[in-house]
């Protein structure tokens, strides 16, 4: 018994008190900061980017494709690309994820998430989500699990992942959606009662990410159904996921 | 000679690999496997003459690998199955059949392995697969998946139960199949590094190390000592992090919530230390062919050592309590037993194999990079139950943390990267790494122009899944999650 009390004392307070203000350490690659003026159009970044996320003239980087590997930053002779540790990078619009030159974190964050009135009204106080893992590497799934652990504890906001689609208000898709998973993804989505939302977590779910050229994918789900919230990352950090959902619910 | 002898990360010329008639090769495989060698790879590739089958066997006692090949002209013909004599060939033969249509006659269970997008012959649908059925009074079926209750990867489990008891479990995988091996081929191998990291998201360092070592061997470069040390440090941190998380999940599955919360928070310390080093909680972006990308500067190193010493204290404290707690032990002991003989027949590796008494550890038997200078001893337990698999993790966490702290404190200054060269044309390399779940095998074959023409990956889960199916026989169906967690298998590593 005494041992258990000792363990409890050692455990202390593990939760992050204010998730909205929490910061991630310096080397974390969050928001891309681009400087198009210094770009010499040498194409090196394009040749090293594994996800075809960069386009030149004008310089822009698509966070929906980016796998945040840092290879472009190191290869650029003009230091035109860098990543800040700003993690609130979720957006309700696919177009917004394409970051242009000179865009600051603050400007991006101000307009990236457009919360919809009816969503806030229905799900604002309680949101239950069902995850379907469809062909990824298990990275985003681990980070999604971490959202419910003692550190991040997303449950404090009434946001939880649930076991059955029948209990859910929305779907979280992780992974690039393989042919073999396409049917199960659609079945699960249809089992969620309306109104329902769709959240795409990670570069794979948003665009196919590192696997976008694979012939083994079947991504027609995204042609048929609209994604309400995009959470970029490879994998997406728990703080990006939680803050994205909170902003989406205008909490 | 029917075989050419090589070592971990040694590049062979393709033309030096002996070509043997398939029945001679088969006899040789039987002979070697009966005298203690194991199968490491058994895969085909399309060549001008037809389908060429490559076989790699491991001779652990002598730290060497044996390589041979056989050609099926025009991709036709068949051969007599090896599986009946050496069961660990089961999945290899299924995979070879699925990809190339060459039938092993007399194979006991030639079902599709992962329903790949590029399978040969008519594409069957996963939904139509007729599962093995047991019939009789009181027998019922339980079907689980591919979408599971928790936030985990997809896979289908079909239980044949008699009341509460599992009589048979059939596992169907392939839902995660996204064609990694095909994508890894080509000439822009630096771009593909991210793909190698995405073979399994919790074995980033292990897979990336295997990928890099294979390419470096082909380029004939040796990474600087400091880079090799940082790779080993990161790999052991990865191992400690995953194992601690796994112990937490086992505590959760037996309803021991103190352990679940405590280990969960402890894992966060370890993976956040990885983030401090390289900006990713799973070590993405740290290792690249040629060396490592990030340095362990003094202030970061001091911070990591301090954190990991705290982790050591926490793990000791919690394991002391957990492994002495009667209510935990009653759930762990004698649950999901996999005996040594079965484990060996299946070809189990890693902590799950070691818990059943198999003394297999690539760090000891085929050391690479930094492990050549800092040897690991082989440990094993013999009960093969959930307890042994959990306790094995505890022992490995201890060893890994000791290693990491010792190596960070003794880290010598030096270069981080070597200049890359071109790949050796028409050559063959096998790269082995002891990942968190066991041995990870990468085989890289280059074409005439020095491009990667065939890339083969074997994750430990490829064999270990069958161990789980075996271990749950005779257990209550409600103990399945616990058994599953104790094996800690990868879906994405299997499906590729």
Image (tube, coloured by chain):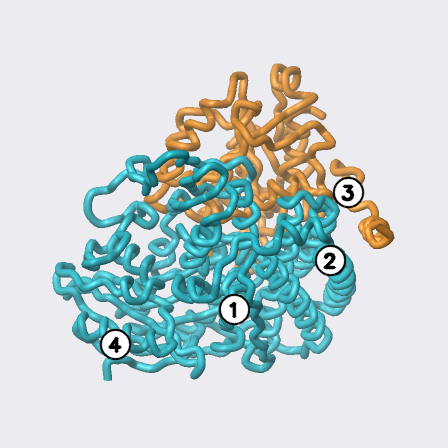
Chain colours: A orange, B cyan
Q: Name the residue beneath numbered marker 1.
A: B357
Sequence order check, earlier mark of 4 and 2: 4
Secondary structure found at label 1: loop
Q: Chain of mark 4?
A: B
Secondary structure of the residue carrying tag 2 is loop
Residue at the image position 56 percent from the left and 77 percent from the top: B371
The label on residue B324 is 2
Give the residue number, with chain letter if any, for mark 3: A15
Q: Quadrant of residue B99?
A: bottom left
Please give the residue where the numbered disc 4 appears in the rendered image.
Answer: B28
Between marks 3 and 4 in the image, the one whose residue lies nearer the viewer: 4
Q: Which mark is residue B67?
A: none
| Label 2: few (<14), some (14–19) or many (≥20) C-alpha neighbours in 10 Å | few
Q: CA distance from mark 3 to mark 2?
A: 28 Å
N-terminal label among 1 and 4: 4
Residue B131 visible in this rendered orientation of the protein: yes
Circle 3 or circle 1, nearest the eye: 1
> CB under 8 Å between callouts 4 and 2?
no
> Numbered disc 1: what chain?
B
Are dots 3 and 1 in contact, CB under 8 Å? no
Q: Is residue B137 above or below residue A215?
A: above
**Residue found at x 32% / y 69%:** B450
Residue pictured at 40% horizontal, 50% vertical: B495
- Mark 3 lies on a secondary structure that is loop
Residue at x-position 71% and y-position 38%: A153
Dividing the picture into quadrants, the one containing residue B284 is bottom right
Mark 4 residue crowding within 10 angstroms, few (<14) / some (14–19) / many (20+): some
Distance between mark 1 and mark 4 Cα atoms = 27 Å
Q: What's the CA distance linking mark 4 and mark 2?
A: 49 Å
From the viewer's side, name the closer residue of B315 and B271.
B315
């Amino acid at each position: 018994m005494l041992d258990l009390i000792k363990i409890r004392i050692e455990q202390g307070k593990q939760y992050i008190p204010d998730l909205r203000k929490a910061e991630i350490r310096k080397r974390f690659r969050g928001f891309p900061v681009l400087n198009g003026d210094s770009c010499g159009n040498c194409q090196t970044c394009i040749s090293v980017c594994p996800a075809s996320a960069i386009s030149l003239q004008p310089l822009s980087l698509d966070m929906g494709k980016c796998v945040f590997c840092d290879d472009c930053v190191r290869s650029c002779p003009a230091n035109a690309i860098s990543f800040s540790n700003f993690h609130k990078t979720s957006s309700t619009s696919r177009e917004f994820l394409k970051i242009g030159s000179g865009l600051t974190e603050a400007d991006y964050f101000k307009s990236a998430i457009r919360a919809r009135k009816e969503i806030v009204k229905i799900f604002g106080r309680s949101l239950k989500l069902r995850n379907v893992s469809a062909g990824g590497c298990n990275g985003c799934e681990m980070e999604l699990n971490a959202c419910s652990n003692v550190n991040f504890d997303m449950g404090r906001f009434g946001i939880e992942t649930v076991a059955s689609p029948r209990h859910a208000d929305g779907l979280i898709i992780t992974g690039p959606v393989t042919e073999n998973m396409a049917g199960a993804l659609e079945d699960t989505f249809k089992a969620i009662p309306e109104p329902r939302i769709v959240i795409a977590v990670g570069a794979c779910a948003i665009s196919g990410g590192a696997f976008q050229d694979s012939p083994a994918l079947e991504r027609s789900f995204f042609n048929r159904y609209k994604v309400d919230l995009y959470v970029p990352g490879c994998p997406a950090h728990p703080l990006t996921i939680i803050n994205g959902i909170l902003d989406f619910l205008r909490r | 000679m029917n075989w050419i002898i090589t070592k971990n990360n040694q590049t062979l010329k393709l033309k030096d690999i002996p070509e043997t008639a398939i029945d001679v090769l088969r006899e040789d495989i039987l002979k070697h496997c009966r005298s203690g060698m194991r199968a490491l790879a058994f895969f085909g590739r399309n060549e001008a003459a037809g389908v060429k089958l490559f076989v790699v066997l491991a001779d652990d006692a002598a730290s060497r690998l044996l390589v041979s090949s056989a050609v099926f002209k025009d991709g036709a013909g068949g051969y007599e199955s090896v599986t009946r004599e050496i069961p660990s060939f089961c999945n290899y033969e299924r995979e070879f059949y699925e990809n190339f249509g060459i039938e092993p006659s007399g194979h006991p269970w030639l079902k599709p392995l992962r329903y790949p997008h590029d399978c040969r012959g008519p594409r069957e649908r996963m939904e139509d697969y007729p599962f093995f059925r047991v019939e009789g009074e009181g027998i019922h079926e339980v079907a689980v998946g591919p979408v599971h209750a928790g936030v985990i990867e997809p896979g289908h489990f079909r239980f044949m139960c008699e009341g509460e008891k599992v009589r048979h479990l059939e596992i169907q995988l392939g839902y995660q199949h996204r064609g990694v091996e095909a994508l890894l081929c080509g000439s822009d191998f630096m771009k593909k590094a991210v793909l190698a990291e995405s073979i399994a998201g919790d074995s980033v360092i292990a897979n990336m190390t295997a990928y890099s070592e294979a390419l470096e061997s082909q380029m004939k470069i040796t990474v600087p000592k400091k880079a090799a040390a940082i790779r080993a440090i990161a790999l052991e941190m990865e191992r400690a992090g995953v194992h601690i998380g796994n112990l937490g999940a086992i505590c959760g599955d037996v309803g021991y919530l103190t352990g679940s919360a405590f280990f969960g928070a402890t894992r966060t310390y370890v993976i956040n230390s990885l983030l401090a080093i390289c900006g990713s909680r799973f070590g993405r972006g740290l290792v690249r062919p040629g060396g490592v990308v990030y340095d362990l500067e003094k202030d970061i190193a001091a911070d990591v050592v301090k954190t990991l010493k705290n982790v050591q204290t926490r793990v000791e404290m919690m394991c002391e309590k957990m492994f002495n707690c009667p209510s935990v032990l009653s759930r762990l002991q004698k649950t999901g037993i996999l005996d040594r003989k079965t484990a060996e027949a299946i070809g189990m590796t890693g902590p799950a194999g070691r818990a059943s008494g198999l003394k297999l550890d690539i760090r000891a038997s085929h050391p690479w990079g930094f492990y050549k200078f800092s040897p690991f001893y082989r440990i094993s337990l013999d009960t093969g139950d959930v307890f042994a698999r959990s306790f094995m993790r505890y022992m490995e966490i201890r060893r890994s943390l000791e290693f990491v702290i010792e190596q960070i404190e003794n880290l010598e200054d030096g270069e981080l990267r070597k200049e890359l060269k071109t790949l050796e044309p028409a050559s063959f390399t096998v790269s082995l790494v002891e990942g968190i779940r066991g041995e990870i095998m990468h085989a890289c074959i280059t074409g005439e122009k020095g491009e990667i023409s065939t890339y083969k990956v074997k994750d430990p889960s490829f064999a270990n899944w069958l161990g789980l199916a075996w271990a749950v026989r005779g257990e209550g169906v409600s103990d399945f999650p616990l058994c599953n967690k104790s094996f800690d298998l990868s879906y994405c590593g299997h499906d590729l």
